[in-house]
Image: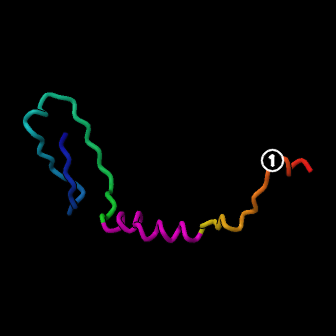
Amino acid sequence: MYRQIIIPDSKSYLLNLPANFIGRQVEIIAFPVEDKKKAEDKYSVEKALKFFKKYAIDFGRVVKWKREDLYE
């Protein structure tokens, strides 16, 4: 496998393939890559903790019940 991340400066790009790729079927895909800093921010631990604190449930206030109480 051969992977290269570039920042192109024009619409065209010349790709030099390794010699062992010659004569073989090769797939070439191009798509924009997210900035590493943005990806780290998106999945940060702080964001996860903030989310769970926002939607936290206080089980201390949950009333204990028995199944029989449902049918009264």
Q: Is 44 placed left or right of 56 in the picture?
A: left
Answer above or below: position of 16 versus 6: above
Report the coloring of the rendering: rainbow
Q: Quadrant of the N terminus?
A: top left
Could you classify mark 1 by the number of other residues whose Cα lies within 10 Å: few (under 14), some (14-19), or many (20 or more)? few
Residue ID for mark 1: 67
Identified at 86% across, 51% down, the residue is 69
Pick whichever, 64 or 27, lies toward us: 64
Outermost residue to the left:
19
Identified at 36% across, 63% down, the residue is 39
Identified at 34% across, 61% down, the residue is 34
Answer above or below: position of 65 versus 28: below
Pick whichever, 62 or 47, lies toward us: 62
Pick whichever, 62 or 25, lies toward us: 62
- Give coordinates of residue 36: x percent, y percent: 30, 64
Quarter of image, res 20 = top left
Answer above or below: position of 64 versus 25: below
Quarter of image, res 10 = bottom left
Image: magenta residue range: 37-54
Q: Let me know if residue 22 is in the magenta part.
A: no
